[in-house]
Amino acid sequence: MVLDALCIRTFQSAVSTYEQALEEVPSFEPARRGLARLYRAELRRAHERRNDFDRVYFEGLLKQVDPSPSAGGTTLRVDTLPEPAEVILGYIQENGRRLGVIREEPLGPTPVHVEGLPTGSYLLRLFRPGFADVLCPILLRPGKELVLTVNLSNSSPKPGEVFIPGGVALLGGDETNLHGRDLHEIDVPPFYISTFPVSFQEYLEFLTAIFAIDPREAPRYLPQHTDGTPYWV
């Protein structure tokens, strides 16, 4: 709490100093660039904290001191292996506490290079004839270029499965959780996952198959209480 208060006071003091300089000399570009750096850093923090109120607030402040189209925007580069794929960019927006694609924009075949995209959440849809579409949720953060290479060589899910192409994921960032307060990036490898949660019937079939191979191993996979005793045998 003390550190947060100190950061806020330091930020406010820096903003006040730059604004005072611009009041004296409105054309003083070093002060304008300094304000832009401060607002851009706070905008980046708002994205990391997933704070939509602060994100909109600092986006507005940044445009006041840097009205260029690329202010707060970023660059997206997408490539696919082992062959090109068509890319459609979906713009995501929250509606009724749910995120959904509000519109889509075709970007053409990979490799794709787009500059000046507004920061925020998007959904990439990659498709090739004869293959299932691959969906890639992405987050574009201010001042950062996102370079994404998607390996589609194993993107052939079985019925009831979906292919997750993998990539960088943000974990943490929950300021109310002592163990998850810090936001950090991890690189998740590609994997398959069931379209729907595992049912009791499927789980019992899994246990039965393990029991047929090794009856002593099966109890390890039974649902357990916190003290280690199984809910049932």
Image: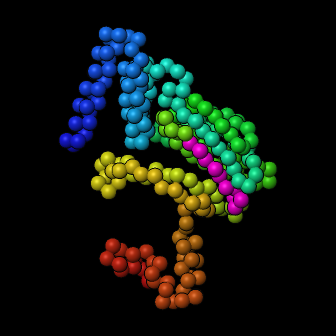
Residue that appears at 36% across and 80% down = 229
On screen, residue 138 above or below 105: below
Q: Is residue 230 visible?
A: yes
Of all residues, the one furthest to the right in this rendering is: 129
Residue that appears at 51% across and 89% down = 215
Total marks shown come to: 0
Q: Nearer the viewer, residue 2 or 34?
A: 34
Q: Quadrant of the C terminus?
A: bottom left
Across and down, in percent, residue 224 comes to: 39, 75
Residue range corresponding to the magenta coloring: 146-155
Across and down, in percent, residue 131 comes to: 76, 54
Instruction: Describe residue 198's horizontal placement relative to residue 180 as left or right.
Output: right
Across and down, in percent, residue 37 comes to: 40, 29
Residue that appears at 37% across and 20% down = 31
Q: Magenta stretch: residue 172 in it?
A: no
Quadrant in the rendering for residue 201 = bottom right
On screen, residue 117 above or below 1: above
Q: Quadrant of the N terminus?
A: top left
Q: Magenta stretch: residue 154 in it?
A: yes
Residue that appears at 52% across and 52% down = 168
Across and down, in percent, residue 156 comes to: 71, 60
Q: Main secondary structure of the magenta part?
A: strand
Coloration of the structure image: rainbow
Q: Is residue 195 visible?
A: no
Quadrant in the rendering for residue 54 = top left
Q: Nearer the viewer, residue 131 or 219?
A: 131
Q: Nearer the viewer, residue 200 or 20?
A: 20
Instruction: Describe residue 204's horizontal placement relative to residue 37 as left or right.
Output: right
On screen, residue 83 above or below 222: above
